[in-house]
């Protein structure tokens, strides 16, 4: 019996779930981009938008 390791993805905050409420609206795009780049460089299997 073999097993496959579990893979994890990361949800990029977009603001509609109030996950960017404490961030200046002018910085929303930069924040989302920074999270996506962090996820891409890390161990995440996928990035969810």
Image (cartoon, rainbow, N blue to C red):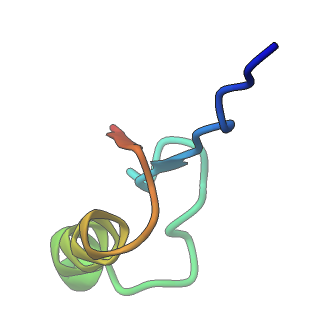
Q: In the rendered image, which quarter contains the N terminus?
A: top right
**Image quadrant of residue 8?**
top right
Residue positioned 38% across, 73% down in the render: 42
Residue that appears at 26% across and 64% down: 40
Instruction: Identify the residue at horizontal 28%, vertical 67% (top origin).
Output: 32
Q: Is residue 37 above or below residue 46?
A: below
Quadrant position of residue 28: bottom left
Of residue 5 and residue 31, the one placed in the foreground of this image is 5
- Is residue 2 depicted above or below 35 in this figure? above
* 1 sits to left or right of 5: right
Front one among 35 and 41: 41
Single out the residue that lies furthest toward the front: 1
25 sits to left or right of 19 = left
Place of residue 20 in the rendered image (x, y in percent of width and height, measured from the top left) = 50, 68
Lateral position of residue 42 relative to residue 29, left or right: right
Which quadrant of the rendered structure holds the C terminus? top left
What is the residue that sits farthest to the top in this orientation?
A: 1
Q: Position of residue 37 (x, y in %)?
A: 21, 73
Image coordinates for residue 14, horizontal then vertical, percent: 38, 51
Question: Above or below — where is 12 with respect to 6?
Answer: below
Q: x, y (%) of residue 15?
A: 44, 53
């Amino acid at each position: 019996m073999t097993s496959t390791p579990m893979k994890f993805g990361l949800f990029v905050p977009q603001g509609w779930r109030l996950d960017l409420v404490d961030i200046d609206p002018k910085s929303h795009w930069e924040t989302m981009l920074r999270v996506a780049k962090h996820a891409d460089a890390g161990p995440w299997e996928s990035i969810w938008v």
